Image (cartoon, rainbow, N blue to C red):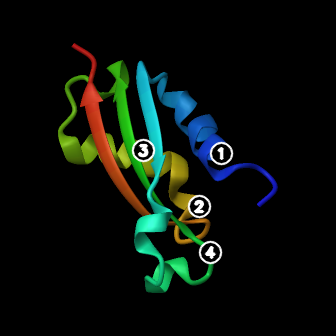
Amino acid sequence: MSIDRTELIRERLSALSPTQLDIIDESHLHAGHEGAKGGAGHYRIIISSSQFNGLAPLARHRLVYDRLHDLIPYPIHALAIVASAVK
């Protein structure tokens, strides 16, 4: 990909107006893993947004996946999400 994957994720998730957004590339922890063989990455996302207010954790995760679904399984192979509402 010509654009940095982390920046691409950040750009996509900006639609959620996050007050916190940490994107951690954990791909190096999965070297040799089947999904990593083709160059796909493993990422951990920590995100807070007022758009998550009143939503159950599964609904928060769906909002994140809705913005990244076309990037899975490549260039994103695995995604760990911590999504919290803004109090």
Residue at image x 65%, y 41%? 7
Element under disc 4:
loop
State the image coordinates of residue 65 (x, y, percent, origin top left).
Answer: 43, 51
In front of the other: 69 or 19: 19
- SS type, badge 1: helix
Question: Which of label 4 and label 3 is nearer to you?
Answer: 4
Q: CA distance from mark 2 to mark 1?
A: 10 Å
| x and y percentages locating residue 55 in the rendered image | 22, 33
In terms of sequence position, does the residue under pointer 2 or pointer 1 come before the other?
Answer: 1
Q: CA gap, disc 1 to disc 3?
A: 13 Å
Q: Name the image quarter holding the N terminus.
A: bottom right
The disc, 4 or 3, on the residue closer to the chain's N-terminal end is 4
Distance, label 4 to label 3, CA atoms, is 22 Å
Mark 1 closeness class: few <14, some 14–19, many ≥20 residues within 10 Å: some
Q: Name the residue: 63% across, 36% down.
A: 11
Q: In front: 36, or 68?
A: 36
Q: Which SS class for mark 3?
A: helix
For the residues bearing labels 4 and 2, Cβ distance under 8 angstroms: no
Please give the residue where the numbered disc 3 appears in the rendered image: 64
Badge 2 amino acid: Leu
Work out whether 81 lies above or below 84. below
Choose the circle earlier in sequence order: 4 or 1. Answer: 1
Task: Give coordinates of residue 27: x percent, y percent.
Answer: 49, 64
Precedes in sequence: disc 1 or disc 3: 1
Q: Which mark is residue 39?
A: 4
Q: Amino acid at mark 4?
A: Gly
Q: Which mark is residue 71?
A: 2
Kindly identify the amino acid type of the residue bearing the numbered disc 1. Answer: Leu
Q: Which residue is mark 1?
A: 8
Q: CA distance from mark 3 to mark 2?
A: 12 Å
* Contact? badges 2 and 1 (CB < 8 Å): yes
Q: Residue at x 57, y 71 (%)?
A: 40
